[in-house]
Image (cartoon, rainbow, N blue to C red):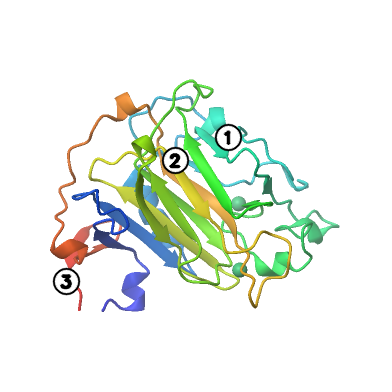
């Protein structure tokens, strides 16, 4: 088995998307980590497009987009009902469902630390949640589901887009196989549901890059098992999010149908891939 130090470098699963057996031959590379996640987040960034295209209008053929929720200045108040198109034209992201209220936490203004990390919702949350990019984090506040649709940045929702990779940072995931990201392709077909590893009071990361020609049109993120409000613990697992990172959204036509990945799938996906961000090697499971 890989040692913990090896695992931390990394990426680790290359395999069939087991929850979508109809996609025989589909390839996914899973980047998953908890605790000190920066190395894995950086490996994911490198793997999906080294350049951060920022707020520039598309189309770009390469690169990635990121949302860290940290705008608003030093004394930002909580944004309790974020417009669902806040990051539409500059990052190509649109949020759903329509009935869901999404919020960006405030930051600890000099005299009001209680506003940080959803302390405006529950005074214990600043100690429950932490940030990856300080100071602000993100969460749905009347649901545990966040959906992101993709559009070509700069097209103002006129050009629906697809991507090949999406990842997110989570904070205070307590339960295994609860917090997840499900990826959907054309015709709303699931490309697979992947679970986020727990890290009590800490950070977790899950990113998936598809390299078998799959194109992601939507992601559905489930955070914990309870809507923000009650104290975390016992039967309650509340979870918030930080950075979203995804490969450049582009129109389906521009995205084309990439050649199948050159990484071999063997034994039903039981071959593990260890990716350091600098080199790739395959390891047989022990
Ligand atoms: Ca942040
Ligand atoms: Ca929790």
Quadrant for the C terminus in the image: bottom left
Q: Identify the residue shown where x is 42% and y is 66%.
A: 33
Looking at the rendered structure, the secondary structure element under dot 2 is strand
Q: Identify the residue shown where x is 64% and y is 63%.
A: 226
Question: In the displayed structure, does residue 268 sit left or right of residue 47?
Answer: left
Q: Position of residue 80 (x, y in %)?
A: 74, 45
**Ligand 1 within 8 Å, label 2 CB:** no
User: Mark 3 packing: few (<14 Cα in 10 Å), some, or many (20+)?
Assistant: few
Cα separation between marks 1 and 2:
15 Å
Looking at the rendered structure, the secondary structure element under dot 3 is loop
Q: Position of residue 209 (x, y in %)?
A: 33, 49
Q: Identify the residue shown where x is 45% and y is 34%.
A: 53
Q: Identify the residue shown where x is 46% and y is 60%.
A: 205
Looking at the rendered structure, the secondary structure element under dot 1 is loop
Which residue in the structure is indicated by mark 2?
Answer: 218
Q: Is residue 73 visible?
A: yes
User: Mark 1 packing: few (<14 Cα in 10 Å), some, or many (20+)?
Assistant: some
Cα separation between marks 2 and 3:
33 Å
Do the residues under discs 1 and 2 have CB atoms within 8 angstroms? no
Question: Of 267 and 48, which appears nearest the observer?
Answer: 267
Which residue in the structure is indicated by mark 1?
Answer: 87
């Amino acid at each position: 088995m890989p040692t913990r130090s090896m695992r931390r470098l990394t990426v680790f699963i290359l395999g069939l998307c087991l929850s979508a057996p109809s996609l025989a031959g589909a390839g996914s590379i899973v980047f998953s980590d908890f605790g000190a996640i920066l190395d894995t987040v950086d490996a994911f960034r490198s793997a999906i497009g080294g350049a951060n295209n920022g707020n520039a209008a598309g189309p770009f053929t390469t690169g990635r987009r990121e949302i860290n929720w940290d705008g608003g200045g030093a004394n930002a108040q909580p944004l309790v009902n974020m417009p669902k198109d806040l990051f539409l034209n500059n990052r190509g992201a649109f949020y759903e469902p329509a009935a869901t209220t999404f919020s960006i936490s405030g930051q600890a203004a000099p005299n009001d630390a209680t506003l940080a990390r959803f302390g405006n919702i529950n005074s214990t949350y600043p100690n429950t949640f932490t940030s990856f990019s300080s100071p602000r984090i993100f969460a749905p506040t009347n649901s545990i589901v966040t959906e992101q649709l993709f559009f070509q940045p700069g097209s103002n929702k006129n050009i629906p887009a697809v991507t090949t990779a999406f990842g997110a940072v989570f904070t205070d995931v307590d339960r295994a196989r609860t917090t997840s990201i499900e990826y959907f392709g054309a015709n709303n077909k699931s490309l697979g549901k992947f679970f986020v590893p727990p890290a009590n009071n800490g950070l977790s990361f899950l990113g998936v890059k598809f390299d078998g020609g799959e194109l992601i049109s939507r992601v559905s993120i489930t955070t914990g098992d309870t809507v923000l409000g009650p104290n975390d613990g016992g039967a309650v697992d509340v979870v918030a999010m930080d950075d979203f990172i995804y490969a450049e959204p582009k129109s389906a036509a521009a995205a084309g149908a990439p050649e199948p990945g050159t990484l071999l799938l063997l034994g039903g996906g039981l071959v593990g891939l260890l990716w350091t961000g600098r080199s790739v090697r395959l390891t047989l499971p022990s």
